[in-house]
Amino acid sequence: MALTRRNFIKGAVAGGAVVAGATAVSTPACARENKTMPPMAVGLLYDSTLCVGCKACVKACRDNNDTQPEFSTEEKLWDTPLDISGRTINVIKMYAEGTSDHKDQERNGFAFIKKSCMHCVDPSCVSACPVQAMRKNPESGIVSYEPADCIGCRYCVAACPFGVPQFQYDTATPRIIKCQLCRHRQAEGKIPACAEVCPTGATLFGPVTALKEEADRRRALPSESVTTFARKTVGSTDLHEKKVANYIPHIYGEREMGGTQMLLLAGVPFEKLGYPALRDRSYAASSETIQHTLYGGMILPAAVLGGLVYVAKKNVPNHHSEED
Amino acid sequence: MAHASPLGGSVVTKTTVIAAAFAAAAAIILAYRFIYGLGAVANISNGYPWGIWIVWDVIIGTAFGCGGYAMALLVYVMNKGEYHPLVRPALTASLFGYSLGGASVIFDLGRYWNAWHIFTPGWINVNSVMFEVAACIGCYVLVLWIEFLPVIAEKYASPEMRKKISKTLYIFIALGVLLPTMHQSSLGSMLVVFGFHIHPLWQTELLPLLFLLSALGMGYSIVIFEATLVNASYRRPSEAGIVGKLGRYMVFLIAAYLVIRWGEIIVDGKLGLVFSSGGLSLAFLLENLLFLIPIILMASEEKRANAQLQFVAAVCLLLGGALYRIDAYLTAYDRPGWHYFPSVSEMLVTIGIIAIEVLAYIVFVKRLPVLHTVKRAHGVAATTNE
């Protein structure tokens, strides 16, 4: 048998289990696969080439989620968050290179990019959270946060591949802040505030399958051709016409980490926009494979404990005769 | 005649007074933290949400507390009775390392008033490595106190009571071997979900095994380290003979660690990164050097009997294990645009916790039968002064 990475890991894990006192390790690691998209999953399609950087979505997000403006200039005249933070759930950032003359161009160009929760299909935060304060709705797929459950350990902050959950370090009663796709508005039949106010439809709300179809449609159009774009919700009648930009051939979020419910289109490579290249297999799947292999049904620990109790019962009297 | 006896003497000494002063400073800083939030005293951020209060106090602190685990494995599982005199002092150090590591988590929890959720059905997330670590360390702290009961009972309890404790002790000794095996490996597993945030030289699905092996190695090292220091401080006869034999297990564990670590790096095609990762290459090589030195120093029976070499080997391994954990959790944790270095307040709290451990250890060995009795016939009495 050739020495492959998997075999090596298996061999080493088996060896380690023996060190730990296990008598038999017959179960090969039964891999926990990526979770799958909930059937009624909703999300956002953000098209960087449609975004004009007006930040209406940043303001609407504040109004609907009760966050206060953040200032990064001395005058403190405008709400100028530099990134998501313990006070900011959604931001529009800008990429600029060289002379920054052309929109959606990598060289001597510029582009806008939205930063907020990706609502992963298989979220690291949900896997990491020890107390289920981070949950994924089995129908809508919204990744929500419940402060009443949270212990403030910040494992979600450290684990998220996108750096989304933000902890509040400046208060004695901190909580985690993250986009929950305006689930309180959706409960009232409304759509997320950012999509509601976007004047160009750059942020579009809808079922993930429809968003994916719309993304595919846009990418298939020849650049410089003119087409209609919906505002607010995918398939809405609130339309405007615009020239199709030169998309890079990649829908971000389609495969990354097993897929996300926010999909991104852009004219500039995503790594330049702060979205890292990520593998398809979710990190939650890797982590839970280890946990389930070692602790599934608590069979292995129980077996080891049984062995240890037997050995200890035999040996302890030999060495623990303090009565003398 | 008992195996062990209290050292006796005053607990108010220069060392204990200084330790108490550091503990008091930590208490003041923590009061500030509870009023103004974590950011008021610690340099942690949303890029580096975990600082030294987690990485040193808990991750490294509990690895340093593996003496009791390592000795229980040797004496009660592998049936090596000759090491029995080393069990109690090791257990005492583990007791404080773990109790304070566990307690110090509270300072770091943002919403500490909800901490009980982690042990409560309805909240528990069994998929979470953090849950495994928390539940397991919580149980182990209880087990350590139960394992320590005979020491307290010897001084205060009736003979019948002592017999009862003795009879059920084997169950807790078994748990005392199982639980650290679980959570010390999980402290490695905890990093797997961080994925690409951790540099490939540290990120591997073998993290649990590497953390377990190094924690056990550190367990034997801390026993050597403490025995050397205690015997020198209280002018007790050297235990170099028996302590040196531990070197064998240390070498075996660390050799296994190095073979697996390098094996994974080679098989996974990451060897080039060993030299091409800038500062992280240096950190990686320093770590490995600190693991390699004890193997060289403890290579032969003759060397293992040498008290100086024992001490140097133990210190190297403790530093190597600590650096491995600091690197895996902080140095190799890469979040572009973010930086972390602990603040003075943060460090003072950590020093305060170490001070409490030292303080409690001194009080316990002076008041309770922890250290094995030194026979006056040997000509060297256990003196009561420092």
Image: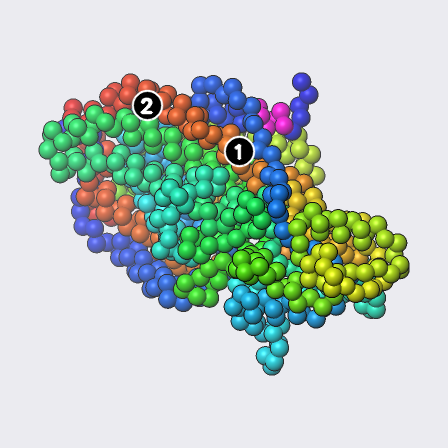
Q: Residue at x 38, y 30 (%)?
A: B178
Q: Residue at x 74, y 58 (%)?
A: A47
Numbered circle sitting on residue B303: none
Q: Amino acid at mark 1?
A: Ile
Q: Amino acid at mark 2?
A: Val
Q: Position of residue B332 (x, y in %)?
A: 58, 48
Q: Give above or below for B347 relative to A20.
A: below
Q: Secondary structure at mark 2?
A: helix
- The segment highlighted magenta reads A6-11
Q: Position of residue A41 (x, y in %)?
A: 62, 47
Picture quadrant of residue A100: bottom right
Q: Is residue B207 left or right of residue B359?
A: right
- Residue closer to the observer: B157 or A64: A64
Q: Earlier in the sequence, mark 2 or mark 1?
A: 1
How many numbered circles are shown? Answer: 2
Q: Quarter holding the N terminus of chain A?
A: top right
Q: Are marks 2 and 1 in contact (CB under 8 Å)?
A: no
Q: Quarter holding the C terminus of chain A?
A: top left
- Residue closer to the observer: A318 or A82: A82
- Residue closer to the observer: A244 or A72: A244
Given the image, what chain letter belongs to the residue carrying mark 2? A
Q: Residue at x 25, y 20 (%)?
A: A318
Q: Residue at x 61, y 64 (%)?
A: A193
Q: Is residue B85 left or right of residue B112?
A: left
Q: Are marks 2 and 1 on the same chain?
A: yes
Picture quadrant of residue A35: top right
Q: Position of residue B68 (x, y in %)?
A: 34, 34
- Residue closer to the observer: B360 or A77: A77
In the rendered image, which residue does mark 1 sit on?
A290
Q: Position of residue A272 (x, y in %)?
A: 74, 57
